[in-house]
Image (cartoon, grey):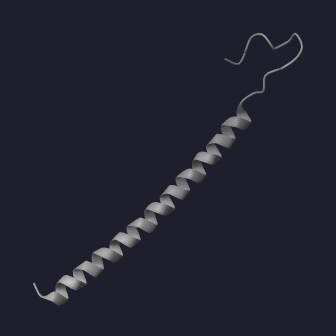
Amino acid sequence: MSIEATVSTALTLENFNLHQSAQLNLLRETLDHQARTVTEIIEAATPRLATSGHLGTQINTYA
């Protein structure tokens, strides 16, 4: 194998690794965004329990 072919292969692998790294970072950002969105949806759908008074402060009826 010639030195030119070796250098070319090394540069190709380096470019491939950079491209894969960029794609992985984008995937991580997307998954983090989806996790935040799902958390917000779940928190919005969770009923708030009463904190004072006689009704709803002793037993969680949603459980």
Q: Is residue 19 left or right of residue 52?
A: left
Which residue is more in the foreground, 44 or 16? 16
- Where's residue 20, x and y in %? 38, 67
> Which residue is at a point 54% across and 58% down the rendered structure image?
29
> Which residue is at a point 24% across and 84% down the rendered structure image?
8
Q: Is residue 63 left or right of residue 34?
A: right
> Which residue is at a point 83% across and 20% down the rendered structure image?
50
Q: Name the residue furthest right.
A: 53
Q: Is residue 42 left or right of residue 48?
A: left
In the rendered image, the vertical position of residue 48 relative to residue 28, given as above or below: above
| Residue 5 in which image quadrant | bottom left
Q: Is residue 12 left or right of residue 43?
A: left
> Which residue is at a point 28% across and 74% down the rendered structure image?
13
- Where's residue 15, x and y in %? 35, 77
Q: Name the residue furthest left.
A: 1
How many circles with numbers are drawn on the protein?
0
- Where's residue 35, x and y in %? 58, 46
In the rendered image, the vertical position of residue 50 relative to residue 25, given as above or below: above
- Where's residue 25, x and y in %? 48, 62
In the rendered image, the vertical position of residue 28 relative to residue 40, given as above or below: below
Name the image quarter holding the C terminus: top right
